Image (cartoon, rainbow, N blue to C red):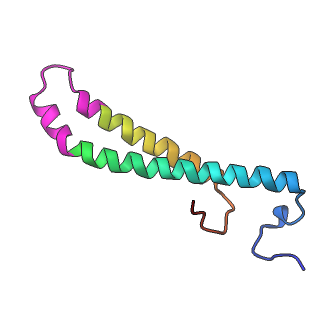
């Protein structure tokens, strides 16, 4: 009997296709972990971004730029992680 928790297109995969699917989902989980790490770092950097924007002269705002970079990284890795991990019905823990 087929496993009804699996999507229809994944029920008749060859072992090589299952391995490629698992590899894709593990990479998606890795990207989600990187996303959450970027969110944590960005939250910490936001503590200093206001001071950097207030007191740094001209366009020299390195902490604000790092904060924007980590937010952008979180967004990119989050979208990529969700896309790669789509269809997974289990929680992957390493």
The image quarter containing residue 74 is top left
Q: In the drawing, does residue 51 fall left or right of residue 94?
A: left
The image quarter containing residue 22 is bottom right
Farthest residue, direction front: 94
Percent coordinates x, y for residue 47 in the rendering: 19, 45
Q: Which stretch did the figure color magenta?
A: 47-65
Q: In the drawing, does residue 78 fall left or right of residue 15?
A: left
* Quarter the N terminus occupies: bottom right
Q: Residue at x 76, y 53 (%)?
A: 21
Q: Residue at x 42, y 39 (%)?
A: 72
Q: Main secondary structure of the magenta part?
A: helix
Q: Residue at x 80, y 77 (%)?
A: 4
Percent coordinates x, y for residue 31 in the rendering: 54, 47
Farthest residue, direction bottom: 1
- State how many labels appear: 0
The image quarter containing residue 70 is top left
Percent coordinates x, y for residue 59 in the rendering: 21, 20
Q: Residue at x 37, y 49 (%)?
A: 39
């Amino acid at each position: 009997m087929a496993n009804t928790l699996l999507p229809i297109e994944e029920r008749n995969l060859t072992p090589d296709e299952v391995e490629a699917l698992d590899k894709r989902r593990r990479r998606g989980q890795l990207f989600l972990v990187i996303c959450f790490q970027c969110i944590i770092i960005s939250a910490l950097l936001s503590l200093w971004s206001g001071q950097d924007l207030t007191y740094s002269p001209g366009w020299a705002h390195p902490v604000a730029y790092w904060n924007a970079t980590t937010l952008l990284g979180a967004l990119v890795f989050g979208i990529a992680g969700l896309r790669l991990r789509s269809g997974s019905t289990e929680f992957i823990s390493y």
